[in-house]
């Protein structure tokens, strides 16, 4: 074969490459149109029957020299690429999905305090409001260490209906009074949308607990309030389900959502739940919302609070949540995991000392 024939053949190959390229992109556009339609219909992008039909059709029409196996392998790659494109387009529409590396939602509270701005925020307070005295003593210690967001839980979703259910509105009154005294903000768990207007009088940040993460009516209602919302991951929720729950709030009009990883249910018994720190790292990649690590409910024990706090900080989370009680052994809920006030101070020393190391 002469040099010029070789060049001629190569030129033909180059032309065909460009034709294939054009056809591939033409095909991708059609596939993405189909993807949009599938999304509207609520069907999945992967349709095994359709894929089998296309492969059989290609086999029947294949005149070689490529074998049927080679042709099928090549087309499977094309199908996969189209599906990835459809999925990417669908994800781009999700409001909580991070679109650029530097996109972040920063929650700004009325005094200018921010969460999600790159600092490490501590949210703390007792598991539940039990009395004015214990709230005051706890808040005083927290305020001394610069904690701005105080747990003022008045409704407790307990496993047993015979356990302490929270003080109700009188508990919120106590929390509000104490928060005002120490210039703090109250976050408190809402159980039902019927409580919204009453709670607006007391609460700065609404809180949706793990058990309500998929209560879509409550999530939509939280989308209509003009206060930030803390959303906890469900007991056995996947990260995808967690983000879709946040999407309910954001797509209903409230962009100020804070996510809390609180441990998931696994076979492990030595901790109450299993802290999914990999999940925290993934959330930080996938969403622009602030992510906080609950080192209390994920562990169920106070003796590993320090290492978990260090891990939370190192994971890139925006903060941690820890329960603190003046006298944990007599606490009316979560007695085993709440830190004493001296333990809280030691924890704060730990994460502040190590700030430079990270
Ligand atoms: C809480 O943090 O008050 C709580 C009840 O935890 P969870 O909803 O994660 O179980
Ligand atoms: Mn608790």
Image (tube, rainbow, N blue to C red):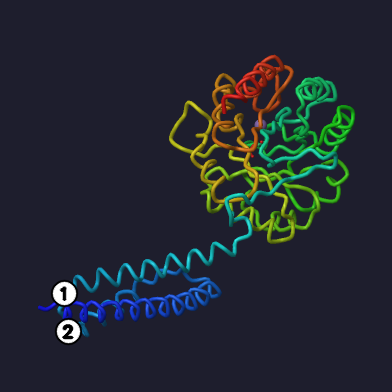
Image mark for residue 218:
none
Image location of residue 18, percent across then percent down: 35, 78
Callout 2: helix, strand or loop? loop
Q: In the displayed structure, would residue 222 be above or below residue 47? A: above
Residue drawn at x 60%, y 37% as measured from the top left: 317
How many numbered marks are there? 2
| Residue on which disc 2 sits | 63
Q: Is residue 53 visible?
A: no
Residue drawn at x 58%, y 40% as measured from the top left: 261
| Residue on which disc 1 sits | 67
Position of 222 with respect to 351 (left or right) is: right
Position of 250 with respect to 224 (left or right) is: left
Q: Dividing the image into four equal quarters, which quarter contains ligand 2?
A: top right
Callout 1: helix, strand or loop? loop
Position of 238 with respect to 60 (left or right) is: right
Residue drawn at x 50%, y 74% as measured from the top left: 38
Front-most of residues 155 and 115? 115
Q: Is residue 280 visible?
A: yes
Front-most of residues 96 and 48? 96
* Image quadrant in which the C terminus is located: top right
* Image quadrant in which the N terminus is located: bottom left
């Amino acid at each position: 074969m002469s040099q010029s024939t070789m060049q001629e053949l190569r030129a033909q190959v180059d032309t065909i490459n460009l034709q294939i390229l054009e056809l591939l992109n033409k095909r991708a556009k059609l596939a993405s149109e189909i993807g949009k339609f599938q999304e509207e219909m609520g069907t999945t992008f992967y349709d095994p029957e359709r894929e089998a039909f296309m492969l059989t059709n290609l086999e029947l029409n294949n005149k070689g020299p490529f074998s049927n196996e080679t042709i099928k392998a090549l087309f499977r790659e094309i199908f996969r690429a189209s599906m990835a494109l459809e999925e990417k387009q669908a994800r781009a529409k999700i409001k909580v999905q991070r679109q650029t590396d530097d996109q972040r939602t920063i929650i700004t509270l009325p005094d200018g305090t921010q969460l999600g701005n790159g600092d490490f925020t501590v949210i703390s307070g007792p598991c539940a409001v039990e009395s004015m005295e214990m709230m005051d003593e706890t808040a005083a210690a927290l305020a001394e260490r610069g904690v701005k967001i105080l747990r003022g839980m008045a409704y407790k979703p307990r496993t047993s209906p015979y356990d302490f259910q929270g003080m109700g509105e009188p508990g919120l009154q106590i929390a509000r009074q104490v928060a005002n005294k120490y210039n703090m903000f109250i976050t408190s768990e809402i159980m039902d949308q019927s409580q919204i207007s009453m709670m607006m009088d007391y609460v700065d940040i609404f809180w949706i607990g793990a058990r309500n993460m998929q209560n879509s009516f409550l999530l939509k209602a939280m989308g209509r309030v003009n206060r930030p919302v803390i959303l906890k991951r469900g007991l056995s929720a996947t990260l995808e389900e967690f983000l879709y729950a946040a999407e309910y709030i954001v797509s209903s009009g409230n962009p100020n959502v804070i996510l809390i990883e609180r441990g998931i249910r696994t076979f492990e018994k030595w901790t109450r739940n299993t802290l999914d720190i990999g999940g925290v790292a993934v959330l930080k990649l996938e969403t622009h919302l602030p992510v906080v690590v609950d080192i209390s409910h994920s562990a169920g024990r106070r003796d590993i609070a320090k290492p978990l706090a260090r891990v939370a900080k190192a994971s890139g989370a925006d903060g941690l949540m820890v329960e603190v009680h003046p006298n944990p052994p007599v606490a009316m809920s979560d007695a085993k995991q709440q830190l004493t006030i001296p333990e809280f101070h030691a924890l704060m020393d730990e994460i502040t000392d190590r700030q430079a190391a990270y």
